[in-house]
């Protein structure tokens, strides 16, 4: 069962975190199993159970009602966010895979949150560009192609309310962001993204060593 990844947090501490955190419920465990069985090696893209708990608590504490997610995969993060925003909230999910999001739809229905999720199958930047004028979000989650992270950030920031928060996954990238000589495209993109956000005067941010690194960015 995915928890904090030991290449960011050592295994002993990861196990301690897991054993002292709220456990995924039956539907979440079923989704984890289905993801592993039906997506194979790609199942590693699913967020950890501890991240899901954090997202749900954070969305609820923020009072988020309008949320957008870039990169849905099999829907674990969306399920968590949908629970956090409650029955009056709305979550737009952006993804390009009918196959993987079919798993998501199945489990959103089981969890009783399908009616608050609007899944849009199209490139995320196109979906964002087509949103009605005046659209505003309380919260966003980015977990998609790393080379587009800067583009997603720039497209979403104008749509965030003041005090709204973007959560961005994989920003420690198995510690590879520490490699000053890195040439791999995703690593280079994440290094540039982290540097860009830290220097952006429109926001304040902090990288949380959870999962593969989660950056919390608040619009000021």
Image (cartoon, helix red, strand yellow):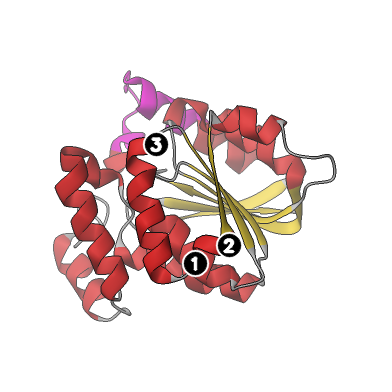
Magenta includes 182?
A: yes
Of residues 211 and 40, the one drawn nearer to the viewer in this rendering: 40
Q: Position of residue 108 (x, y in %)?
A: 42, 61
Looking at the rendered image, the quarter that the C terminus falls into is: bottom right
Check the image and report above or below for 112 versus 119.
below
Look at the numbered discs 2 and 1 and tell me whether their residues touch, using CB distance below 8 Å: yes
Task: Check disc 1: other Cα within 10 Å, few if <14, some if 14-19, many if 20+.
Answer: some
Measure the alpha-carbon separation of dots 2 and 1: 6 Å
**Mark 2: secondary structure:** helix
* Residue 53 shows in this picture: no
Query: Observer-nearest residue: 48 or 208?
Result: 48
Residue 152, by quadrant, is top right
Q: Residue furthest right?
A: 134
Q: Which residue is mark 2?
A: 116
Q: Which residue is mark 1?
A: 113
> Residue sitting at 37 percent across and 67 percent down?
110
Q: Which residue is mark 3?
A: 98
Magenta highlight range: 176-192
- Residue 161, percent across and down? 77, 54
- What distance separates the C-alpha of mark 3 from that of mark 1? 19 Å
Residue at point 50%, 74% (across, down): 57
Horizontal side of residue 155 vs 48, given as left or right: right
Assign a secondary structure to mark 3.
helix
Q: Are marks 3 and 1 in contact (CB under 8 Å)?
A: no
Taking the spot 48% from the left edge, 69% from the top edge, the residue there is 56
């Amino acid at each position: 069962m995915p928890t904090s990844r030991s290449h960011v947090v050592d295994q002993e501490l990861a196990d301690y975190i897991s054993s002292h955190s709220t456990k995924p419920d039956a539907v979440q465990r079923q989704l984890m199993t289905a993801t592993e069985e039906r997506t194979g090696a790609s199942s590693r893209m699913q967020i950890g159970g501890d991240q899901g708990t954090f997202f749900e608590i954070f969305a609820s504490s923020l009072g988020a009602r309008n949320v957008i997610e870039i990169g849905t995969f099999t829907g674990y993060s969306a399920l968590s966010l949908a629970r956090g925003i409650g029955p009056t909230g709305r979550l737009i999910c952006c993804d390009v895979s009918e196959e993987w999001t079919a798993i998501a739809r199945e489990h959103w229905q089981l969890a009783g949150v399908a009616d608050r999720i609007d899944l849009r199958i199209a490139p995320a930047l196109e979906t964002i560009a087509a949103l009605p004028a005046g659209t505003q979000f309380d919260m966003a989650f980015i977990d998609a192609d790393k080379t587009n992270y800067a583009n997603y950030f720039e497209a979403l920031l104008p749509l965030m309310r003041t005090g709204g928060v973007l959560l961005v996954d994989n920003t420690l990238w198995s510690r590879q962001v520490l490699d000053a000589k890195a040439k791999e495209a995703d690593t280079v993109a994440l290094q540039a993204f982290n540097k860009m956000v830290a220097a952006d005067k429109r926001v304040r941010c902090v990288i949380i060593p959870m999962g593969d690194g989660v950056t919390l960015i608040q619009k000021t």
